[in-house]
Amino acid sequence: MTLTIRPASPADLDVIMDLWLTGNLAAHDYISASFWHAHEAEVRQAMSESQLWVAEENNTLLGFLGLVDDYIAGLFVDAKAQGQGVGGKLVAHLQTTHKRLTLAVYRKNQRAIRFYQHHGFIIGNSQVDEATGEKEYLMTWEKN
């Protein structure tokens, strides 16, 4: 797989939003689908205020990562491309340009926790996401 990692363009936003919604519905089946649908407009606005990186192959967007300062606000990969290194390449790209990265991940999302641990993130504090009532871990990666 020959991936290109690049900053997102405004033309990517519809595909990014589709990946966001589809990814949340698949990964967080313990949260009502209506929650994700109700927040689409708010998230679309937040995307325009975030630094977005996309992974694409042959002009097909396979995943994206949203960053606010050093906080990874979201990482989503098309279901057909999961397990092929797309998410890892997005994270690795940021690890070359940042000294520290943080994120929050739902405790029930063990697949994501393992993914981030594999990429050097360490579980720190836990908290409750006020919007969903779900427990989550705060995770941090720091360059050695």
Image: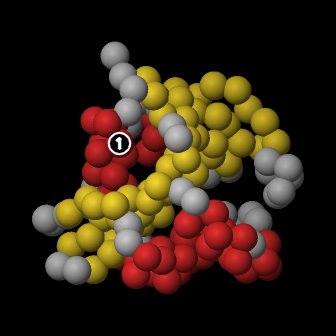
| Spot occupied by residue 135 in the image (x, y as percentages of width and height) | 78, 44
Counting the numbered discs, the total is: 1
Q: Which residue is mark 1?
A: 94
Q: Residue 11, image x and y in percent?
A: 40, 81
What percent of the width, then of the height, locates residue 82?
A: 37, 65
Q: Residue furthest left?
A: 2
Where 33 sits versus 47, above or below?
below
Q: Residue furthest top?
A: 144
- The residue at 67%/48% (across/down) is 106
Q: Is residue 133 visible?
A: yes
Q: Is residue 87 left or right of residue 132?
A: left
Q: Is residue 33 left or right of residue 138?
A: right
- Residue in view at x 72 percent, y 70 percent: 42
Taking depth in this image into account, of 53 and 20 the one nearest to the observer is 53
Q: Which quadrant is the N terminus positioned in?
A: bottom left
Give left or right: position of 138 versus 91: right
Whether residue 90 is situated above or below residue 139 in the rendered picture = below
Specify the quadrant that holds the C terminus.
Answer: top left
Indicate how the structure is coloured in the image. secondary structure
What residue is at 70 percent from the left and 26 percent from the top? Answer: 125
Q: Is residue 107 above or below residue 101?
A: below
Q: Residue at x 58, y 60 (%)?
A: 49
The quarter holding residue 45 reads bottom right
The residue closer to the viewer here, 20 or 117, is 20
10 Å neighbourhood of mark 1: few (<14), some, or many (≥20)? some
Answer left or right for 32 relative to 76.
right
- Disc 1 is placed on an element classified as helix
Q: Nearer the viewer, residue 73 or 111?
A: 73
Q: At label 1, which amino acid type do we have?
A: Leu
Residue 71 position, x and y percent, is 55, 41
Q: Can residue 26 be seen in the rendering of this structure?
A: no
26 and 139: which is toward the camera? 139
